[in-house]
Image: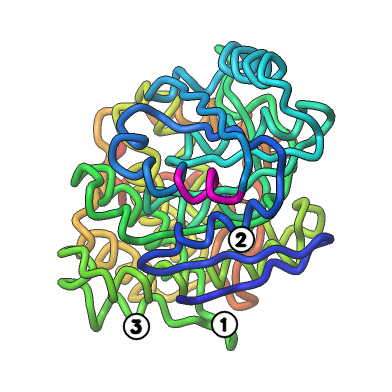
Amino acid sequence: MERLTVAVPPAYDVVVGVGALGAVADAVGARRTVAVVSQPGVLAAHGDPVLAAVAATGARVVVTPIADGEDAKSLATVEALTREWAAAGLLRGDAVVALGGGVVGDTAGFAAAVYHRGVPVVQCPTTLLAQVDAAIGGKTAVNLPEGKNLVGAFHQPVAVLADVATLATLPEREFRAGLGEVAKYALMDVGPDSTAVAALLDARCDAVLARDPAALADLVARCAAIKVRVVSDDPEERTGLRATLNYGHTLAHALETVGHHDLHHGEAVAVGLVFAGALAAALGRIPDPAAAHHRDLVAALGLPTVAPGLPAADLLAVMHRDKKAHGGLTFVLRGPDGLTAVDDPPAPALDAAFAAVGIDA
Ligand code: GLY
């Protein structure tokens, strides 16, 4: 089992490996009441040992399920959850356990951030995407009809338990989509502190795609180590470092919005990475083979490299509204100094990058 420490006040551990959920009792500690937020399918697959372990601490366990799907990531769900917690007498010294993927982690995390102005939350991610990214670092949010993640808060968990055994039951498309965030780490992780995600994928791609537990434990731990390092250095995205975790995400968010979520988030990130590589090459920031490596890696993971059929003008309009933008267009791109924000690239470079992902400018 790998244990990584996020160095924020108060510090907390990210436990990665087969059986990491076994640490849930320790993570919860001594509480009078613990609310477990999950979804029916996740509860059926992974709930019993978690509920039993929490009950064995002597806590009263209250299960507050939410619905599946992105629509459940809403203020209405937050209201329903917090009202159930209030009815159950959950107090500030009690705790919430979020057992599930990004929808559960984000929604339960945000509800925990605002209930009694903050109750402790243990994040137990059960999808690849949540294990390598969403569950670590305390970003919590729900959606508004006007856009994704528009209402949120930083609320660091007291622990993250990433049990790779839970990945065995993920639907294939959801598992592959998680590899989009893995590809992000592989392509952003080029400095002297590299945890060699790309080298692991080169050596053990088949084992990863076959969901070999040892390969997945190694992969998730290496990705999580990058996230832990970045979050520890820039927990609230103030220095620009944490924004580099959005590599590939500027186009990805636009693809999701304009395409009305036909692409899963990780699939959109995969296309966004190919775009970011091509844009960096068109700007002369990286050599052409480095851009080709973006495409090859994404393709090797069975993820889309193109997103034809979406109008560039619509994508550009959405990208202008990106959270990172300051009125123009801002991308996180590789270059001689590593990953940095690049404002307003010239139109010919943008056209070349759109062409690289099959979009007519
Ligand atoms: N997913 C990007 C971040 O946590 O900052």
Q: Residue at x 60, y 78 (%)?
A: 336
Residue situated in front as seen by the camera: 67 or 202: 67
Q: Is mark 1 within 8 Å of ligand 1?
A: no
Q: Is residue 86 magenta?
A: no
| Residue 25 percent coordinates (x, y) | 57, 55
Q: Is the distance from the Cβ of mark 3 to the nearest ligand 1 atom less than 8 Å?
A: no
Residue at the extreme bottom: 192
Q: Earlier in the sequence, mark 3 or mark 2?
A: 2
Principal secondary structure, stretch drawn in magenta: helix
Q: How is the image coloured?
A: rainbow
Q: Is residue 10 above or below residue 337?
A: above
Figure quadrant of residue 149: top right
Where residue 67 appears, x then y in whole percent?
41, 20
Mark 3 residue crowding within 10 angstroms, few (<14) / some (14–19) / many (20+): few
Q: Quadrant of residue 81?
A: top right
Tag 1: Cα neighbours inside 10 Å, few (<14), some, or many (≥20)?
Answer: few
**What is the magenta range?**
52-57
Residue 141 position, x and y percent, is 63, 31
> What kind of element bears circle 3?
helix
Whichever of labels 1 and 3 marks the residue nearer the N terminus, that label is 1
Residue type indicated by callout 2: Asp
* Separation of residues labelled 1 and 3 (CA atoms): 13 Å
Q: Which residue is mark 3?
A: 199
- Residues packed near mark 2 inside 10 Å, few (<14), some (14 to 19) or many (20 plus): few
Which residue is tagged 1?
A: 191
The amino acid sitting under disc 3 is Ala
| Image quadrant occupied by the N terminus | bottom left
Quarter of the figure with the C terminus? top left
Reply above or below: 5 against 134.
below
Give the CA separation, mark 2 to mark 1: 35 Å
Closer to viewer: mark 3 or mark 2: 2
Task: Identify the residue position indicated by label 2 in the image.
Answer: 26
